[in-house]
Amino acid sequence: MIQVLEKGVADKIAAGEVVDNPLSIVKELVENSIDAGATSITVEIQKGGKSYIRVTDNGCGIPADQVETAFLRHATSKISQAADLEHIQTLGFRGEALASVSAVSRTEIITKTAEEKTGTRLVIQGSQIAEREITGCPEGTTIVVRDLFYNTPARKKFMRSDAAESSTVIEFVSQVTLAYANIRVRMINNGSMLFSTPGNGKLYANILTVFSRDIGDQLIPIQAQEGAIKLEGYVSGPGQSKPTRKHQIFFVNGRVVNSKVIQKGVSSAYADKLFEGRFPIAILFLQFPPDRLDVNIHPNKREVRFHDESSVAGFVEGALRKALLSKESIPAVKKEDLFRKPNAPAPPASGKSGNREQEEQIDVKKLLSTLRTEEHVPETSSAQVREEPKIYQTSAIGSQPQVIKEVLAEAPASQAPATPPPFDFRELRVTGTIFATYITAVDEDSFYLIDQHAAHERIFFEKLMAQYENQETHSQPIMFPIMLNVSHSADQNAEDWLAALAQMGFGAEPFGPRTYAVKSIPLFMGLEEAQCFLTDFTDDLGDGKLLDNLPVIEKITMRACKSAVKAHDHLQDSEIQQLIQDLRQCENPFSCPHGRPTFIKMTQYEIEKMFKRV
């Protein structure tokens, strides 16, 4: 039942105007449709939403005697008292959206409940009711918004180009398809259907609607639970990254959010797996107890606040790290990568089922980049809008769309599976080395190349950090001390870095002006390795960095890993076996501390494709 909130309750959630562009209108209307239990939602816009927005759903509808009430400020069916704010489970709750929309546009609503025989049509212009009548219509609600900001020209002039406004709306709707795979969502722009999802609950199929199949085929599933907190979704392996965070989409209790907390968990999980300036793909769905979450932070409701932020970030990091230990996270080499002609478009990635290459997909991200180049979109009349729209897909080569069939109507993918198991080193069989640099190995269905230098760097780094963190000093004395000459700035901070070295297993003491004698080294290091490490370590002390926190130690230790086995160093069979055994013990065996991969794999199927055996 829709009712106007008491002033005391309304004051606690007042957010002012929530409408400042077409996206904000579409967002509020789509969220209302989801809250109404809709299983089908159609979003249609013209000229970026400036002239026309229509959102149609098959939800519960609004009773005839409550339609006008729904357009009053702070009128909502989601909450009734201040205590309800402690456990919000709907996307909307403030009751400001319809009032704000109708105040700055010509708004029309057609709605009907299942119990009523006829529907209601209401037209509001600038908050004033212009028309009201009984009408025939199916169950659900249709809201049409025309001439946005027609009565507030000062706000109208601040809107962006049609293409820019369209892009933000399309991107939001595409994100909604990820969170609600059980809802059939159709997106229409200027009379042409951009995409349509089947609404069959298959999350992975909808991911392929938003991203290209080249990306989707390489995503790793995530599923984790800790008490009442649950996380699922997909992430990319270390071999697949992007220059920005645009491909990181987070949902909390079905709501698209911008969360620094979740972002921190993702960044921490990939900290030593990607080069600086590269970011993973992450589509994550977090279910969180509503009473431990505050969504009443910002008018657009994209900001959330967790009661225990550090535990949430740690939970996300742990879940992702577990997935990144699986075989799926090892970068894979495919036939297309080896034999692709320069500047030629990548062919569709091979799938796990025989008919996958024949399926047609929409790459919404590519579509958005195409839309941003379009500054002039022809107007479409109301009569044209109601005609059966065309369906478009962006071309893999050109910038113009082409007509295709219904998208993903029979997508074979299923809901997010469980996190894959960790890679089993026991199944790995070493077969030799090539170029005295790469160790070759096989298991039941894949061939592997292991970079001996990157692998030893990882082993080296984790052993040093373990000793530093656990304050374990497994040292061995050396007959002739290693003499270190340091800079003046390093000499001034000697107390800090000497303590850090001691925690890693080095025993050093002053010997003269800016000179220090190292009389013991970590048990797992050879003398030459220790000398190289100490040289690089002290070189990095010249910047005057204080070694009072773990991140600084990690960075310096990463740079000092040059003492690891080099490329072209010939290893004995016993040394190779020991390296693999040590790598197995690592927390992250698949990348060196700098983010380079230690493993690269090629499946038997890809090899047989190259020899045309399949």
Image (cartoon, rainbow, N blue to C red):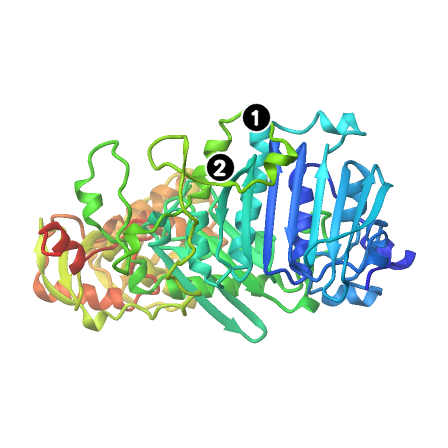
Residue occupying the point 38% across, 69% down: 472
Q: Is residue 403 visible?
A: yes
Instruction: Residue 118 in the image: state x and y as whole percent.
Output: 77, 58
State the image coordinates of residue 280 (x, y, percent, origin top left). Answer: 42, 50
| Residue lying at 21% horizontally and 73% vertically, measured from the top left | 426
**Mark 2 vs 1: CB contact within 8 A:** no
Camera-nearest residue between 504 and 41: 41
Q: Report x, y in % for residue 106.
A: 77, 37
Horizontal side, residue 223 vs residue 450: left or right: right
| Name of the residue lying farthest toward the bottom | 227
357 shown above or below 424: above
Q: What secondary structure is found at the residue carrying circle 1?
A: loop
Kind of residue at badge 2: Leu
**Image position, residue 79 (x, y; %):** 79, 63
Which of pointers 2 and 1 lies earlier in the amino acid sequence?
Answer: 2
Which residue type does callout 1 highlight? Answer: Pro
| Residue at numbered disc 2 | 368
How busy is the neighbourhood of tag 1: few (under 14 within 10 Å), some, or many (20 plus)?
Answer: few
Q: Secondary structure at mark 2?
A: helix
Q: Which mark is residue 378?
A: 1
In this rendering, the answer to whether 401 lies above or below 269 is above
As drawn, which residue projects farthest toward the right?
A: 7
Q: Quadrant of the C terminus?
A: bottom left
How far apart marks 2 and 1 lie (CA) works out to: 18 Å
Asked whether, in this view, residue 432 is left or right of residue 95, the answer is left
Residue at x 83% of width, y 48% of height: 133
The N terminus lies in quadrant: bottom right
From the viewer's side, name the closer residue of 228 and 31. Answer: 31
Q: Residues within 10 Å of mark 2 (few under 14, many from 20)?
A: some
Q: Is residue 503 visible?
A: no
**Residue plotted at (59% across, 41% down):** 169
Q: Is residue 539 above or below residue 221?
A: above
